[in-house]
Amino acid sequence: MELARMTWEEVACLPPDCVALLPVGAVEQHGPVLPLGTDAAIASHLARAAATRGNRVLLPTLAVGVSHEHRQFPGTLSVPPDQVRDLAISLGRSLAAHDVRRLVFVNGHGSNAAPLAEAALRLREESAYAFVFNWWQSIPETIAALFPSGDAHGGAVEASAMLVIDPESVRTGRMAHASADRGARVPWGEFVEGVQVAFDAAEFSDLGNVGDPSLADAETGKTILREAAECLDRFCSWLAAQRDDVLRPPSSRR
Ligand SMILES: [Zn+2]
């Protein structure tokens, strides 16, 4: 079910174990191959798939996130972490006011993870049970097995997913160019003695990709999306099955 297509009377009838899904993305450079809205597209795809089952409600996608680390590239939109946190809290409160108290932030972008986790903790104090599903963290073994040389941003993982979700948005003609960039073969960040000393994509990639999108293919994308969607589905089922007193923080020990 899609919240924006429901009426208030229908929402009022939702059962207490209903799970709401909020896709959270970003509008930020993804190298020369992938579109700026990649993170929102993947998060929306996964949340929409999960919302087709059980008593689940798909919320409108929060399309812009914390993308300060990509600001040097044109088209990147960024809002401060506090704004993402506060917006997530406000949406959670809006739902909880009418007894939709189970919420999953389906996140497509790394820098949104911390403010969303903060929002989830705050909501938990108010008897609204929100959790952060960072989709790429749901299937680490699958991603490591598919791309053993690593992949961080605008590389093979996201390009494979986008070849399934929106193939026309993938600039395959730019893949060779992106593959030749210094960013194609480095992890995210630069480190000296274990200390991170570079933080922006522009410091370790000329074209913005951190990973090699030329290694992508649609079959791999189907595997990645199917496994992540199954994980999300299992998590939503778990969340729906929990009693409130299990989800609630412990009361005072005094
Ligand atoms: Zn991305």
Image (cartoon, helix red, strand yellow):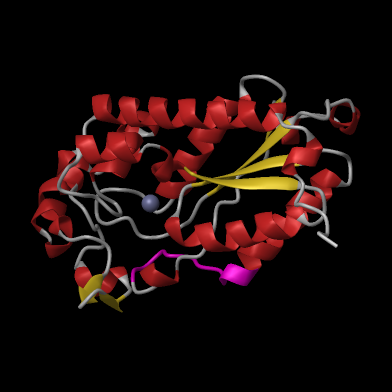
User: Disc count in the image?
Assistant: 0
Quadrant in which the N terminus is drawn: top right
Q: Does any portion of residue 217 appear in the rendered image?
A: yes
Locate residue 32, reporting x and y percent: 24, 55
222 shown above or below 98: above
Q: Residue at x 8, y 56 (%)?
A: 180
111 shown above or below 59: below
Q: Is residue 200 left or right of residue 249?
A: left
Q: Is residue 176 left or right of residue 226?
A: left
Q: Mostly what secondary structure, the magenta segment?
A: loop
Q: Residue at x 55, y 26 (%)?
A: 233
Q: Residue at x 41, y 45 (%)?
A: 137
Q: What segment carries the magenta color?
A: 73-82
**Quarter-wise, where is residue 60 in the image?**
top right
**Quarter-wise, where is residue 160 in the image?**
top left
- For residue 79: magenta? yes
Locate residue 196, reporting x and y percent: 29, 76
